Image (spheres, helix red, strand yellow):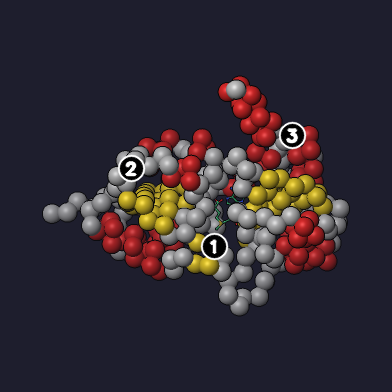
Amino acid sequence: MTTIHPVYLVGAGPGDPDLLTMKAHRLITSVDVIVYDKLVSAAIMDLAPVGTTRIFAGKQARNHHMPQPDINSLLVDLALSGRKVMRLKGGDPFVFGRGGEEALHLAKNNISFEVIPGITSSAGCAAYAGIPLTHRGLAHGVRFVTGHTQGDNVFDIDWQNLADPDTTLVVYMGLTNIRLISSALIDAGLGGTTPAAIINEGTRSDQKVIITTLVEMPDVVEKTPLSGPTLLIIGKVAGLAHDLAWFHEALDDSAEARS
Ligand SMILES: C[S@@+](CC[C@H](N)C(=O)[O-])C[C@H]1O[C@@H](n2cnc3c(N)ncnc32)[C@H](O)[C@@H]1O
């Protein structure tokens, strides 16, 4: 009789392999199959042994490589074949990662699963950019929202509620609608001079951080085409990056130490 193993729904963190949990690392080096997303960095996939089967289920806004129902069915089929299966996702599987949908599908098919959290990109990017998300005196809370719309859905967000100068707003998948996001927040009363950070490829060696303002954010992006994942952090705390950015200095120091 075939032994059915639990499917591991694992967060890979934002990209730097040193940010993997020990459990994620142990599983990457011991499962039979890894079904992975576009957001999982090459440096992390390189940790898998040569014999591991890798299945790319990558997704980009408007360019779905493998439709979600197919990914759900694939996980069930692989588990039923008796192989040890890992579903590896960028960041945390339960933060804008559709990990919940996959877990529900596995549960519906009586396949057990484990969820291994990862560092979500807002935490990873903020730390590596030098932005304390809830710095005392500047922000008494933080909100995570998506800036991406599905199909024809209206971009239906309560901007009035989000335009709070004392709360940090982190926008995942916000690049495409950056102009709309900026003007909607300003129309809702958030000052145009509110600091804003645009973080591209956060925590990776090619991380780019642009500190600007809410009103200037769209033009800055137009002038600096960015590829790869990008996160927006809007709020007074973004200004602290001027004093607290450390990551590239650390990279420079380690290059110097090696030479
Ligand atoms: C589909 S969501 C997945 C979020 C992921 N589950 C997480 O917890 O970070 C994809 C979005 O996450 C953000 N993102 C993920 N990794 C990132 C990185 N290394 N740098 C900047 N943004 C990142 C971007 O906004 C990207 O468009």
Q: Is residue 15 left or right of residue 110?
A: right
- Residue lying at the far bottom in this picture: please name it: 152
Q: Which residue is mark 2?
A: 50
Residue 157, percent from left and from top? 69, 67
Residue 144, percent from left and from top? 64, 54
* Residue 70 or residue 205, whichever sits in front: 205
Mark with earlier residue (3, 2)? 2
The amino acid on which the numbered mark 2 sits, given as a three-letter code, is Val
Q: Which residue is mark 3?
A: 244
Q: Is residue 2 left or right of residue 93?
A: left
Question: Is residue 178 something one can see in this rendering?
Answer: yes
Assign a secondary structure to mark 1.
strand
Assign a secondary structure to mark 2.
loop
The amino acid on which the numbered mark 1 sits, given as a three-letter code, is Gln
* Number of numbered tags placed on the structure image: 3
**Res 60 label:** 1
Residue 44, percent from left and from top? 46, 42
Mark with earlier residue (1, 3)? 1
Front of the two marks 1 and 3: 1
Q: Is residue 5 left or right of residue 93?
A: left
Q: Residue at x 46, y 38 (%)?
A: 21
Q: Judge whether 177 appears above or below 130 on screen.
A: below
Q: Residues within 10 Å of mark 3 (few under 14, many from 20)?
A: some
